[in-house]
Amino acid sequence: MTVLRFNIFLIASLGVCCCISMAETPDFGNNWQNAHTFSADGSVVEGSLNTGGDVDWLKFIPSPQYIYAVSCSSIDAGYTDFQIFSANKYNSMIYEITSEESLSSTSFTFYIYCETPAAIYVKVYDNDGDYEISAWADRAFPLDSYSDACSSPHNITLSGQTTVI
Ligand SMILES: [Ca+2]
Ligand SMILES: [Ca+2]
């Protein structure tokens, strides 16, 4: 009888643990410096915007010379705002690579050329409710022949008429 009770308690505990591990616990960071790191292997990350103006930041580290796909979906009614940012090579600041158009949807997939392993960030905000994010390496691409150093830029030749206003 004691063994049976213990097994029932163990099963109940495992069930609770499984539910907890699926949830966003703790809340994903509210700024890019505290972003939640996830793997860009196609697996889905589930998150939730809590009431009171919650903001969630997530990030992944890409392999260089790949085009990555980032898929964002709002699960609940209404749309959630998603913005995607890239870090500089020192990981000291970020800049946005999405536009306003890509935010006004309940679901979208955005493709990013990742020449370096600089972190890619996703900011989620607006409208309480659940959302899903996944990312994966879509395909490799060769490096371009243009220099990365400003001391040896690729020269371009301008042609045509120049208009000065
Ligand atoms: Ca959250
Ligand atoms: Ca948060």
Image: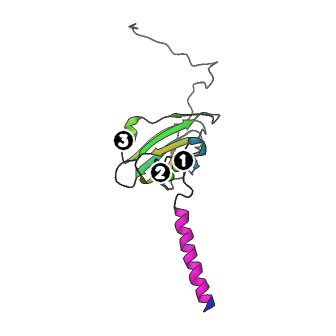
Q: Nearer the viewer, mark 2 or mark 3?
A: 3
Residue 130 location (% of width, % of height): 43, 55
Q: Nearer the viewer, mark 1 or mark 2?
A: 1
Q: Please identify the dominant SS of the magenta region.
A: helix
Question: Which one is nearer the viewer's eye here, 118 or 7?
Answer: 7
Residue 76 location (% of width, % of height): 37, 55
The answer to which of marks 1 and 2 sits earlier in the sequence is 1
Circle 2 sits in a helix, a strand or a loop, which is it?
A: strand
The answer to which of marks 2 and 3 sits earlier in the sequence is 3
User: Mark 3 highlights which residue?
Assistant: 104
Whether tag 1 and tag 2 are in contact, CB under 8 A, the answer is yes
**Res. 58 mark:** 1
- For image coordinates 52% across by 63% down, the residue present is 22
* Residue at the bottom extreme of this rendering: 1
**Residue type, numbered disc 3:** Ser
The alpha-carbon separation of the residues under discs 3 and 1 comes to: 19 Å
| First to last magenta residue range | 3-27
The alpha-carbon separation of the residues under discs 1 and 2 comes to: 9 Å
Residue 126 location (% of width, % of height): 42, 45
Q: Please say whether residue 114 is visible from this viewpoint.
A: no
The answer to which of marks 3 and 1 sits earlier in the sequence is 1
- For image coordinates 49% across by 51% down, the residue present is 134
Location of the C terminus by quadrant is top left
User: Mark 2 highlights which residue?
Assistant: 133
**Res. 109 mark:** none
The alpha-carbon separation of the residues under discs 2 and 3 comes to: 16 Å
